[in-house]
Amino acid sequence: MALTVRDLTVHYGSFTAVRDARLDITDGEVLALLGPSGSGKSTLLRAITGLEPMTSGSVSWDGTDLATVPVHRRGFGLVFQDGQLFPHRDVAANIAFGLRMHGIPKAKHRARVEELLELVGLKGFERRRVTELSGGQAQRVALARALAPEPRLLLLDEPLSGLDAGLREQLAIDLADLLRRSKITALLVTHDQEEAFTLADRVAVLDAGEIRQEGAVRSVWRYPADDDVAKFLGATSFVDGVAAGGVVHTDLGDVALQELEDGPVRLGLRPHALRVAETGVPGEVTAAVHRREHLRLVVRLSEKDTVNTVDAVAPVTADLRAGDPVRLELDPDGIAVVG
């Protein structure tokens, strides 16, 4: 075991920002703290680094309590949303700053800087001014600087949120590859589900300062602990059903979910859990919005009392408008099993 957090609590006056947080991160693992704005993610990360005083609880590394260890002695690397590079220094000097701060001999700086720039895909950028870099390049330099002294834990606080969507997606893929190739132990804070699921091995979902659920990425995505977690993870409506022989029977139709035991079950439906089809429950389109890969619909169901309106998707080429009749079928890929 590498990092251990037990019953960590942070108060701001009478307000509890984080309550009784418990986490474990093993060597080479990436854990994402996932939650909406104001959920306490960044406060928890800052408390782990020592930048935020704890009200109670403990943070330890390999069994050693870090309560009396100052931030710069914990051996952690930090990457923030805006990178916080030095604008008056070039790329090499920014990266070497991390080496100098950790007492690494100057004779070793050049080789380490070149190694890191190749690692983050910026070979040959040593003398480039950081003010001449794109947002994605600047974040790569910030990452290289944090990795320079070979930290035992890398902490990333919303590292990609300041980038445009296309760049954010590509950099997330590149960062995931880097973390896995380098076997870096990391703690990531994000509100972006796609980012968390791209980068992390496990996720901890926070809400109102409490960890509501923690586990492997696929498990949390498929089996959210309750309605609130399911909503944060994309469920827009819910339906109750009964599982029997690997099939769940609901008012919205039947769907094969082989992994479930027989009995009552509650399903959280993400928008792509209901797709336009030739057969299925009837409804009427009330709104249609084009997305990059599909047509997003709001559909008023014609014959259902419990669920009056649902989100659904159709092929991006579908010609559907408000008022058009449709039929919807359940798609297991968009379904979460709640609780």
Image (cartoon, rainbow, N blue to C red):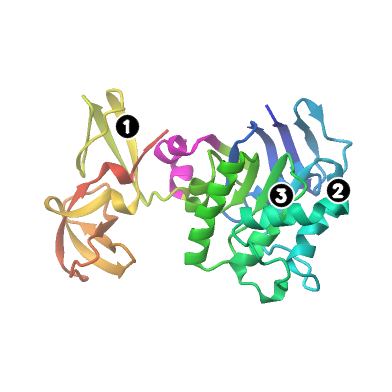
When asked about the image quadrant of residue 321, the answer is: bottom left
Which mark lies nearer to you, 1 or 2?
A: 2
Q: Quadrant of the N terminus?
A: top right
Residue position marked by numbered label 3 in the rendering: 147
Viewer-proximal residue among 59 and 163: 163
Query: Do residues under tags 1 and 2 come within 8 Å of each other at their CB atoms?
Result: no
Task: Say which amino acid is labelled 3.
Answer: Leu
Residue position marked by numbered label 1 in the rendering: 265
Task: Say which amino acid is labelled 1.
Answer: Val
Q: Which residues are magenta?
A: 213-231
Q: Residue 140, position in %: x, y?
A: 64, 60
The local secondary structure at tag 2 comes to loop
Residue position marked by numbered label 2 in the rendering: 104
Q: Residue at x 21, y 42 (%)?
A: 251
**Residue 158 in sight:** no
Question: From mark 3 to mark 2, how far is it between C-alphas?
Answer: 13 Å
Query: Do residues under tags 3 and 2 come within 8 Å of each other at their CB atoms?
Result: no
Viewer-proximal residue among 143 and 119: 119
